[in-house]
Amino acid sequence: MRLEPRIASPAQTILYPVAAFAATFAFAALLVLLAGVSPLGVFRLVFLGAAGSQFALLETLTRATPLIFTGLAVTVAFRAKLWNIGAEAQLYIGAVVTVVLGTGAVAAPSWALVPLIALAAMLAGGLLLLGPALLKTRFGVDEVVTTLLLNFIVLLFVSLLLEGPLKDPMGLGWPQSQRVVAEAQWPRLVQGKRLHMGFAVAILAALAVWLMLARSVLGYEMRAVGHNAAAARFAGIPVNRVLALTALISGGLAALGGVAEVSGLKGNLTLDLSPGFGYTGIVVAMLALLHPLGVVASAIFVAGIFVGADAMSRAVGVPSYIAEVMTATALLTMGTAIVFTRYRIRWR
Amino acid sequence: MGQAAPVVLRLEGVTKRFGPLTANDAISFELRRGEVVALLGENGAGKTTLMSILFGHYLADAGRVEVEGRPLPPGDTRAALAAGLAMVHQHFTLADSMSVLENIALGTQPLWAPRLDRGRALARIREMSADFGLEVDPAARIADLSVGERQRVEILKALYREARVLILDEPTAVLTPQESEALFATLRRLVARGLAIIFISHKLGEVMAVSDRVLVLRAGRLVGERATADTDRHALAELMVGAEIPRPDIGPAQPGPMLVEMKGVTAGGLGPVDLALRGGEITGIAGVSGNGQAALAEVLSGTLAPQAGTLAIEGRAAGAWSPRAALAAGIARVPEDRHGVGVIGDMSVTENLVAEAYRAPAFSRRGWMKRPATRDFARRVIRDYEVKCPGPEAPARLLSGGNMQKLILGRALDGEPRIILASQPTRGLDVGAVAYVHARLLEARARGAAVLLISEDLDEIMALSDRIHVISRGRLSPPSARGELSIREIGARMAGLGFDHAA
């Protein structure tokens, strides 16, 4: 077996990703069959649980909100080939800044406090990624390792804060922060439902990232650095500066996801604020083929699978882990589909 | 020799297509014991593809290969090696940190053999070295060897495996003229012992010197087969190129002011060197690859700052040195590695064309790119520099080597720069593109630009340069004027003679 490069036809570039999704569902169906349940029934329940009612749909969009932020963070970084595996840590730092500033330390009206917290959190998240980026450009330290390990360090740091200085005195001893004040909260988008302003901000962020990558000087520089750093350097593009700015933007986007989760949804900071949004953001970004607008779609898809699988597992005896299996399978099949569009497979 | 010798390799109708391009079109030939067959053709004529099919790296769309009468299974590299085919690549495939002995014996013994039978291996290598004039110390580490010695190791490796067909891919590209002579002597001894050799080249002189028969490839087709004794360089050149290519007409130089002056510059394996470039002149740097050309090019490009010495551009000392500083000083750069450094393959032709100037007010404002302006610029350069491409938005990787080089030339030369660095500007290009690059460089010379031409193609250097320096082990020879030195004298300098390396 060998691979030969080729230029895929437009039909192939559509067909292969569609086939990837079909393969994902086929594989999940196989597992569901092994559990002794009808796959079609299960998929129907997953779909109804994700989009079968207004409540389900809003829940899916709520779940998609942090994934859009982390997905965008990963997209920006990966486009410049800065391998940011630390969106999880950056999201938590954003949440920490939110409760530090938003639980009464700063008294300001909502129109000032909300942007202030957002900007401060983005700066903190950006700086958290700037460290690994500088280590990479100055000393050649692999940022995959540093950003990945920072996730654990930051989570332990958050744990320390929640057991110490940020611990809610009224929290009955639970490791949780105080709730943010009303002025720091993000409004709900639908009265009485959980969907909040964060979703709208996420959509705007996706548009902004798309515009930046496609049209701005910085976006041009980032793409050039990502596609061929040696050629970019030769042409006079300041590669290290571009990577530093990329880190600030990427870390900032992930941190904004943390702000949205605390200010828009949870109200306070706990150690289970994120069930791995930072890592799932990588899946979201890869499924979107690193396109910022595609991130919105793929985040909603992934969130829908998770929300739908939760609902489904309550109704029939198939564990909701099927959602993890499906997103992981989708990633693998999509990766394979990309190889198929770029290369012709020859069997001898 | 002669027609009586048995056929060791037979190709029949070998055809290979890559999309619309036919890289090999129904190629058939025979190779007999004890002969050297030269495979002559321009870059891109299909020589490399043909050899890749032989070794199973590619699958032919049609045709068959026989070795000593037995069909060779397609797409099976191991089978090709087992059948006695061996290839010496342009880029050697040796393990740098291992000894000559280990490299030669590597892969010839079963994996589960407890240890190398050094004594036997050593004896065989010594014997082969002596028999064929392949002088090399079996205990030396590859990293310590010269390029010529490494090539000998590659040939020994093939002989150790009892190769019956030896394929040499442009073996002289990395050798001095004297080393090439030694190689040819070795090849004659090898064929005398019954080996068959395919000698891939596009240099007519050596093809005439070393081969018994010449096969000429052009645009994927076998366009001619001649006994070397019955042909001459001129006839072969016409076969290879298809039409007479006019030599550029070079008038006398009109030396202008001193535009670049390097004094005692050292940087990454280069120097200390003194170099002066005048307007209206092409200064050529001849030398065997890996003698400091890359560092010299990098210094002038701005990607490498001098560690010591002074660099003055138009009389002013260069300050903090970077690619941007070099561009701002008016230096146009054509890099050696087109694919890796010259263009960003996954970005569009337009985006590549503005890569050095995107910050100029013409192309961006307040952090946003002016897309219509960049596209108009790209359209104009594509037209002016005859870049053949599907359009300004097509990814640059779709361009052929020649068109990629035209893109780079367009980007570098469009602003009529005063100083031009062209590093290996025609390597791997077809004749038409070579002529185009030469014409553009001569045009720049005519309008008073200083051109530094770094090339491993001695003919190119001799044809274009008003002054020639030879580079050897990071040092530059004193300049010689056009026609002052013969090709042999330059070859001697390339081998390091006449240099004071101790200084």
Image (tube, rainbow, N blue to C red):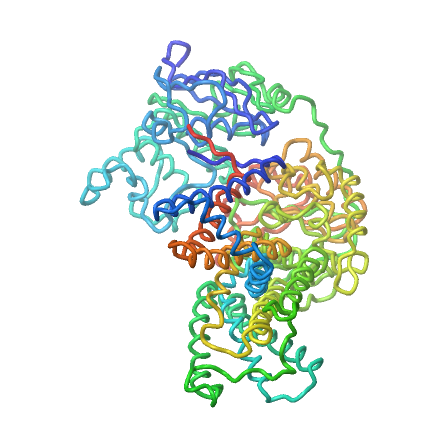
At 34% across and 35% down in the image, what residue appears?
B156
Please provide percent x and percent y for residue B72: 37, 22
Residue at image position (66%, 65%) is A200
Taking the view exactly as shown, the residue that stands out farthest to the top is: B4
Where B459 sits versus B271, above or below? above
Query: On the picture, is B165 further left or further right than A101?
Result: left
Residue B351, given in percent of the width and then of the height, sits at 70, 50
User: Is residue B188 shown to the viewer in this render?
Assistant: yes
Tell me how many marks there are: 0
* Residue B290 screen position, x and y as percent: 51, 48
Q: Quadrant of the N terminus of chain B?
A: top left
* Of residues A36 and B486, the one drawn nearer to the viewer in this rendering: A36
Q: Vertically, is B51 above or below B396?
A: above
- Tell me where residue B114 sits by quadrant: top left
Residue B306 can be seen, yes or no? no
As drawn, A254 above or below B355: below
Query: Quick one: B478 or B353, which is closer to the camera?
Result: B353
Q: Residue sitting at 54 percent across and 14 percent down?
A: B230
Asked whether B147 or A287 is in front, the reply is A287
Q: Given the current orientation, which residue lies at the most extreme left position? A: B114
For residue A138, above or below residue A80: below
| Residue A310 on image: x %, y % | 46, 59
In this view, the residue in front, A246 or B161, is: A246
Q: Is residue B401 left or right of residue A177?
A: right
Residue at the image position 39 percent from the left and 30 percent from the top: B186
